[in-house]
Amino acid sequence: MAVDAVSEVLEIPVSEIEPAPTFGANIRADFIHGMGKVGGKFVILLNVGKVLSVDEITTLAGVSGQSAPELVAA
């Protein structure tokens, strides 16, 4: 995976991570790995392999005029 920039890297203890919430049948949440608690605030932990499908990445690349990025499984 390649990123443009990183603003912060956090280490969150497993004890501070809760399972992903369920939002109901109409909202896609399979890309949420869980919810972490940092400094009294919640952060959403993403499953980067599921944020966008290969088709969605290809579509976005076509719209932006760029080639689709190479996907690497972790």
Image (cartoon, rainbow, N blue to C red):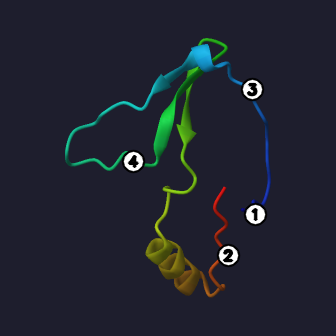
Q: Amino acid at mark 4?
A: Asp
Cα distance between the residues tagged 2 and 3: 27 Å
Q: Are marks 2 and 3 in contact (CB under 8 Å)?
A: no
* Residue lying at 67% horizontally and 75% vertically, measured from the top left: 70
- N-term mark: 2 or 3: 3
Front-most of residues 17 and 59:
17
Cα distance between the residues tagged 4 and 1: 21 Å
Mark whose residue sits in front, 1 or 2: 2
Q: Which residue is mark 4?
A: 30
Q: Which residue is mark 3?
A: 11
- N-term mark: 4 or 1: 1
Q: Amino acid at mark 2?
A: Glu
Q: Amino acid at mark 1?
A: Ala
Q: What element does badge 1 sit on? A: loop
Q: Which residue is mark 2?
A: 70
* Residue lying at 58% horizontally and 53% vertically, measured from the top left: 48
Q: Which residue is mark 1?
A: 2
Front-most of residues 70 and 65:
70
- N-term mark: 2 or 4: 4
Q: Residues within 10 Å of mark 2 (few under 14, many from 20)?
A: few
Q: Residues within 10 Å of mark 3 (few under 14, many from 20)?
A: few
- Classify residue 17 as left or right of residue 3: left
Q: Are marks 1 and 2 in contact (CB under 8 Å)?
A: no
Q: Amino acid at mark 3?
A: Glu
Residue 12, by quadrant, is top right
- N-term mark: 1 or 3: 1
Q: What element does badge 3 sit on? A: loop
> Does 55 appear above or below 42?
below
